[in-house]
Image (cartoon, grey):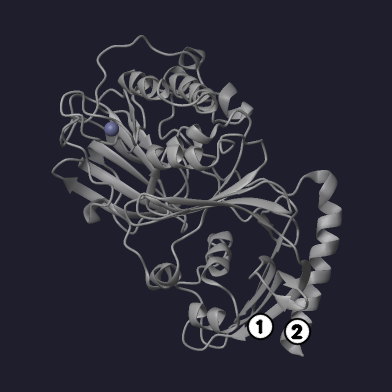
Amino acid sequence: MKLLTNWLAVTARLPRQHKLALASLSLLVGAALVWQPHPFSPKERQSLPAVNQRQEPATVDHSEPIEQSMDANDPALSVPEDALEQDITSEAPRVHHHTVAAGDTLGEIFSQYGLSIGQLYQMLDVNDKAGDIRRGQKMEWQVDEEGQLLTFTVYQSIKYRDDYQFGQGTVDYQRLETKGEFESVTLIGRVNSSFYQQARQSGLTPNQIQNLVSALQWRFDFGRQSRRGDQFAVQVNREFIDNKPVSSGKVTAMLYKSGGRDIFVYRHHDGRFYDQQGQSLDRALRRYPTAKRYRISSSFNPHRKHPITGRISPHNGTDFATPVGTSVLAAGDGVVVKARKHRLAGNYVVIKHGREYSTRYLHLNRILVKPGDHVSMGQRIGLSGNTGRSTGPHLHFELLKYGHPVNAMKVPLPEAHPVPNDERRAFQRQAKRTHQALAQRLNG
Ligand SMILES: [Zn+2]
C-alpha cells in the first residue's frame, strides 16, 4: 500500500488528465494486490479442489528479506546466451511486443513488464493522450541493459503510430504516418557460415530475424540445427514510396529447407505465425508452478521501495505461501539449465522454455532434476522449502521474457491455439499458395 500512497502523492501535483490516467492505474494495481487471476483453462479449473478457489486467510507474508534484493542479472541465476542469441542482439536491442487486453492501462502494462514508471510520466508529459489505449492495439518497445526504455511505439491504426524515443532524461514524441504502398518481396539465401549472417546478407533486418527465430523456437532451433547448405525464402511485406522501399516491413511467410526437412510458417491476420495447417507454433506455459493454488505472500513488484531507506528493491518474482515439501512443477516444456545452491536463492532450478521464456524456482527444500534434463509442463522438479535468504517457507517463482523478469501472474502467455475453425480453410488455402510460390523461388 506504501506504493499506492506514493503514487497518490505524485498524482496530486499532476494536471487533470494525468491524474485520471494514474487513478485508473493505481486502482488496477491496488486490485492486482488482492486479485487472484484464473490462468487455467475452464477444464483445468474444474479439476482443482473447490477449497483452492478462494484465498486462504492471510498469515505471515514470507518472502526474501527486502534489503536482500536479488540481482535479476546474476549470472548464477541466468540462462547463458548462445551464439545466435548474441548475433541477434549484437546489432539492435530486442523488440518486445504487447497487444492491449481488456482492462489494460498503460501503467499496468509498464508494471507487468517491469518498465520504468518515471519514463511513463515522461511520455504523459509530452503527450497527454499517451494513456488512451484500446483493446487489441499493438505496442512495441526496446530497452537497454538496465531495462530503461530506448523506444516505445503505439500503433494507433494501420496508418498512424505514436513513436517515443528516449534519450538521457529526455523523450521525443512524434505521430508518424504510413504514406506508402505495401508490396510483397521475397528474400532468398543459402546458409554458408551461419543462418544469422546469411539472413542479414539476404536483406533481413535484425528485428525480422528475431521475429522468425522466436516464432520457430519450438519447431527449429536456428542456433543448433541450421547447417551449411540450408536454404530459405522469406516473404516480406515492404512499404514503398515512389517505388523506393521506405521500411524493412513485416515478415509474412518463411520456407526453410534443412536436409530433407521443409519448415514453413505463415502469418495470419492476427499477427501470429502458424504452420501450413494453421496449427500453433507455440507451446503453452502455466502461470502457477504448483498443482494447487497457494496464496501469494508477495507479488511481483519491479518498483518495490524499502520502507526505511527508500531505495528501490525490486521483487522480480511471485512468492507463494507453500508449506515445506510442496511439489514444484515445471511451468512448461523445457530444458533444465541450472539446478544447484545459491547464497541468496537457496536450492534453485532454472528452466529454459524455447528461446523466449525461462523460469526460476527458488528456496527449494529438494531439487529433483539436474542440468540438461528435458522436462515437460507439470513435471515435478523439486520440493518447496525455505533455503537461502528467506523469512519463512515459501516458493519464489520467476518468469523471464528474453532475460527480463515479467509478472508471471499478469503478462499474456503463449497458449498454443490453432487458427480459429471458421478461418482455418481460408488460411490453409492462402498458406499453401504461398508455400508453393516460395518453393518455386528456391528451385528456380
Ligand atoms: Zn520472492
254 with respect to 20 (left or right):
right
Residue 47, position as x, y percentages in the image:
56, 24
SS of the residue under disc 1:
strand
Residue drawn 59% across and 22% down?
Answer: 46
Which numbered disc covers residue 441?
Answer: 2
Residue 55, position as x, y percentages in the image:
43, 14
User: How many C-alpha atoms fall within 10 Å of the one at disc 2: few (<14), some, or many (≥20)?
Assistant: few
Q: Earlier in the sequence, mark 1 or mark 2?
A: 1
Separation of disc 1 and disc 2 at Cα?
Answer: 8 Å
| Among the 4 quarters of the image, the one containing residue 91 | bottom left
**Image marks 1 and 2: residues in contact by CB distance under 8 Å:** yes
Which quadrant contains ligand 1? top left
Residue drawn 33% across and 34% down?
Answer: 303
Residue 71, position as x, y percentages in the image:
23, 46
Residue drawn 55% across and 30% down?
Answer: 40
Residue 437, position as x, y percentages in the image:
80, 77
Front in this rendered view, residue 210 or 143: 143
**Residue that numbered label 1 is attached to:** 188
Q: Amino acid at mark 2?
A: Arg
Q: Is residue 207 above or below residue 438?
A: above
Front in this rendered view, residue 283 or 202: 202
Residue most extreme to the top: 57
Q: Is residue 27 above or below residue 180?
A: above
SS of the residue under disc 2:
helix
